[in-house]
Image (spheres, rainbow, N blue to C red):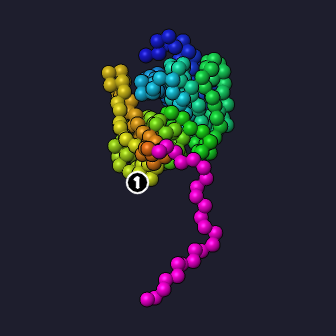
Amino acid sequence: MFASQLALAERYAVLLSDAGVVRGLLGPREVPRLWERHLVNCALLSEAIPDGADVCDIGSGAGLPGIVLALRRPDLSVTLVEPLLRRTSFLEEAVSELGLGNVEVVRARAEELHGKRDFAVVTSRAVAPLDRLLTWSFPLVRQGGELVAMKGSAIHEEIERATRTLRQLGAGAVRVELLGVDVVDPPTTVVHVEAPGPSALGLADARGPRRGPPPRRPTRPRTRPHRSEH
Ligand SMILES: C[S@@+](CC[C@H](N)C(=O)[O-])C[C@H]1O[C@@H](n2cnc3c(N)ncnc32)[C@H](O)[C@@H]1O
């Protein structure tokens, strides 16, 4: 599963089960199932991410799935977004200890980055129900990119409940994918939500984008043409 990155993954596992537990980022009961339930699960997500993508992991916590993606896929550049200082401190230490040159740690709520940053892929695990997750993370997906969120078996109900938000956000195709069917039980469920392309947004037409400022509105009310009443 981790192939040549196995040594790095093992170092990360030690960090999680040691400092991660001491600092309350991971429950002690998770330690025996760290590989199966957390690391392998997150590693499977990398199968759903296109080559060379810039990825944002919102609500990264102790680095799941962002750090696993970064160590498994050196071709990706990964931004970990997490509002809590205790967690970003752990993330910075882990990134430095693992020597991950393809990771940036940003201390913020996802909403604070709206209009400032965008990414080809925005991912997350265990952050919020899809409806709320969409409002936080979909505005960070660049045109032509997608949201790829790790979810549980109730994903179809979550999609149903998010119908209105999907429409309001102008989301494109929604698709559920099961990863690692022969590897983990249950398999890893991810939902893909595509951002619309330029034509769907009405940004470009056959003449290309409009240049220059919008037409000025008249400053004085126009006088009606006088009609003679013959
Ligand atoms: C249950 S933890 C999951 C952590 C990690 N993704 C995992 O699977 O172990 C949820 C994380 O989302 C973060 N979070 C909550 N609201 C957020 C927001 N609006 N933007 C970014 N992160 C948020 C929390 O601080 C917390 O670290």
Q: Residue furthest bottom?
A: 230
Residue drawn at 35 percent across, 38 percent down: 175
Residue 172's x, y, as percent?
A: 40, 43
Q: Is residue 83 left or right of residue 153?
A: right
Q: Is residue 207 visible to us here?
A: yes
Magenta region, main secondary structure:
loop
> Where are the magenta residues, as a range?
207-230
Q: What x and y, as percent, mark residue 82?
A: 60, 37
* 124 in the magenta segment: no
Q: What's the residue at 63%, 29% (across, down)?
A: 104
Residue at image point 34% right, 43% down: 156
- Is residue 13 visible in the rendered image? The answer is no
Query: Which of the 4 quarters of the picture holds residue 86?
Result: top right
Q: Quadrant of the N terminus?
A: top left
In this orientation, which residue lies closer to the viewer: 227 or 224?
227
Residue toward you, 78 or 92 = 78
Q: Position of residue 134 (x, y in %)?
A: 47, 45
Amino acid under disc 1: Arg
Mark 1 highlights which residue? 164
How far across and how far down the image is residue 9, in percent?
53, 17
The quadrant of the rendering that contains the C terminus is bottom left
Picture quadrant where residue 56 is located: top right
How crowded is the residue under tag 1: few (<14 C-alpha within 10 Å), some, or many (20+)?
A: few
Q: Residue at x 52, y 45 (%)?
A: 209
Q: Secondary structure at mark 1?
A: helix
Of 225 and 98, nearer the camera is: 225
Please say whether residue 216 is one of the residues in the magenta stretch: yes
Residue located farthest toward the front when viewing the structure as drawn: 230
